[in-house]
Amino acid sequence: MNSAPAPAPAPSHARPNVPRAPRRFERGGRPISHGPRPGGASRRIQRILRRPGIGGPRAERVADYYPELPAENVVRIVPLGGVEEVGRNMVAVDVNGDIIVMDAGFHFKEEEDAPGADYSLPNTSYLEKNRERVRAVIITHGHLDHIGGIPFLMARFGNPPIYTRNLTSIMIQRRQEEYPDVPKPEIVIVEPGQSVTISHTKVKFFPVTHSIPDSMGVSLMTPYGNVVLSGDLKLDHEDGIPSEHEVKTWGELAKDKNLFFIADSTNAERDGFSIPEKRVQQTLDEIIKTVSGRLIIGTFASQFERMMHIIESAEKYGKKIVTEGRSIKNNIEIAERAGLLKIDKSTIIPAQDISNYPPDKLVILCTGAQGEEFAALMRIATKQHKYIQFNERDTVVLSSSVIPGNEVSVQKLKDNLYRNKVTIIHYRSSDVHSTGHGNTGELVWINKQVNAKFFMPGYGYYSMTASHAKAVEQSGRSRESIIMADNGSVIDIIDGETLNVHKQKVPSTPLIVDGFNIGNRQEVVMRDRQSLAKDGMFVIIASVNIKTGKLRKSPDIISRGFIYLRESQNLLNEARILIKKTIEDTTRNMNPIDLDYVKNNLTDVMAGFLFARTNKAPMVIPVLIGM
Ligand SMILES: [Zn+2]
């Protein structure tokens, strides 16, 4: 009785084994002026060569799965994003006939899957299918991996109200200003300790420690116990002893009967306790106080609390601050708007005024500690900044860790900094950075406090969620009570006792934001980009006598990213002969001559030829000019 119900009818975008339409009509949404979509053999070869990318080849797709409505005795949890990556966070809880969504994040682009795309979003098809039951979106805090999807996603499931805290609401509204065409969200501001009733469901909020103020966790009440979501978090502690306010917060939560707990796994691959942010702030305060000469601090704008403390410390020691980087300037403005930062107007000075102040009295706060090419720190280090140049008396603090994947650019940045002969302080040499996410020591402690019947490690790549699971299991939690979910998993708890993870998943292929377009339709564009990135392109330009079908002259060939033409004269000569033969053979006895048909045929033949000769499958684009 708990088996997953039959799949719903296939939506229009799935095309299971539909016979191929005549190729000449297969234009794949590409503007006609670009010529016919390179199809046929070229595309077939690419399918063989390439592992399935976004969505995989269309022919292999099966109908999307949508489960039946949960029965009255079922609490359903559907993670839509964030359990196979860091970012794109979104979890839906389906209970009492209501769907309540927690977080709506995005994930910065992954070059592998989507070259050139801006970012990806959770797939909200499940919510769209049930949009009349989506009652609210609760946002745990203001980081982009929790709020980034809001402008793109809310309208897809009926623009339900957003419940969140004050700072987060300002960040959401601020971001919304960049999307004037999107309706303004309805925001309900809540505070920890408060409980609200959303449709049939009572919801409580509790404060958590993270790198941005106003972070919170959520506890949804169900007849079988609470569903608790941690949000991003770490513990405030002293040598592994949680502080008084943490003991109080989690102790409160421990009084409830908790059914299901979802918690942050981002740092679950690290043991023990993370460095408390307090210690980082003390270290930075000491540096700001004692360093003579200019101080340049590179950090993440997302380290909101730290940014505020640096500014307060600088003011305390009578130093002026120059801010460099749009995200830092934005966040300072938001902090002031939220009433979290109160500083004298004269404390922050523009970069062009820097020479009016003694170096000892200057702190430059900038983005770019990950070595981003165009960020302030790199521009200063490579002497491309208009107003700021490094000198030997400067001290640079890199108040961040290296995000995996950024090693090369951070190394470049460090080399450039050392060339400037500045003094460098980084997180390996001093406590100038701490993460916003708890290590396993913290996670295990929290897990024990919440003491939920079931636990699902959330927020993180599989290695992180798996490490989280292992850590809590080693601390005494039964393996059966731990659920390892994927994006799109449907987890039902029946009568508060029995777990049923559906065999099938709801659609979870991320939506891609690419310029102004969103959605799966981008698959076509992405495949083209992947193909171009991998094997380049091969353009054939030929003028064809529209009466006789003969070529006016030898065809021109342009190629990019495929082979070096000058060293491939033989191949090119053979290609030209084959092009001429193919066009003239195809047009023989054709009256009138159908250039589209000729183009498609030529694409197939040339793609096959090039693959046979080079083992590469460039995108073949014929341009035939009828004269
Ligand atoms: Zn966060």
Image: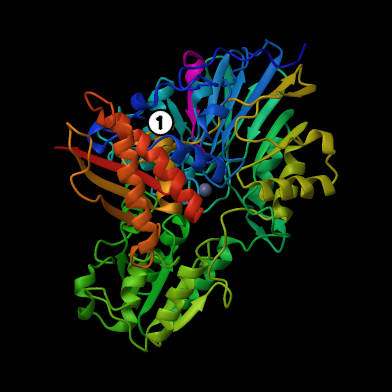
Residue pictured at 69% horizontal, 35% vertical:
261
Seen in the picture, residue 368 relative to 610 is either above or below; the reply is below
The residue located at (74%, 35%) in the rendering is: 483
Looking at the rendered structure, the secondary structure element under dot 1 is helix
Measured as percent of width and height from the top left, residue 396 is found at 42, 77
Q: Is residue 280 magenta?
A: no
- In the picture shown, does residue 541 fall above or below 423? above
Would you say residue 132 sits in the magenta stretch? yes
Q: Nearer the viewer, residue 346 or 16?
A: 16
Q: Which residues are magenta?
A: 128-140
Q: Is residue 544 left or right of residue 24?
A: left
Where does residue 389 sit, x and y in percent of width and height?
A: 28, 80
Cβ at disc 1 under 8 Å from ligand 1: no
Q: Nearer the viewer, residue 424 or 569?
A: 569
Corner quadrant of residue 310:
bottom left
Q: Which residue is mark 1?
A: 521
Quarter of the picture containing the C terminus is top left
Where does the image place residue 597, in percent across and percent down from the top left? 31, 29
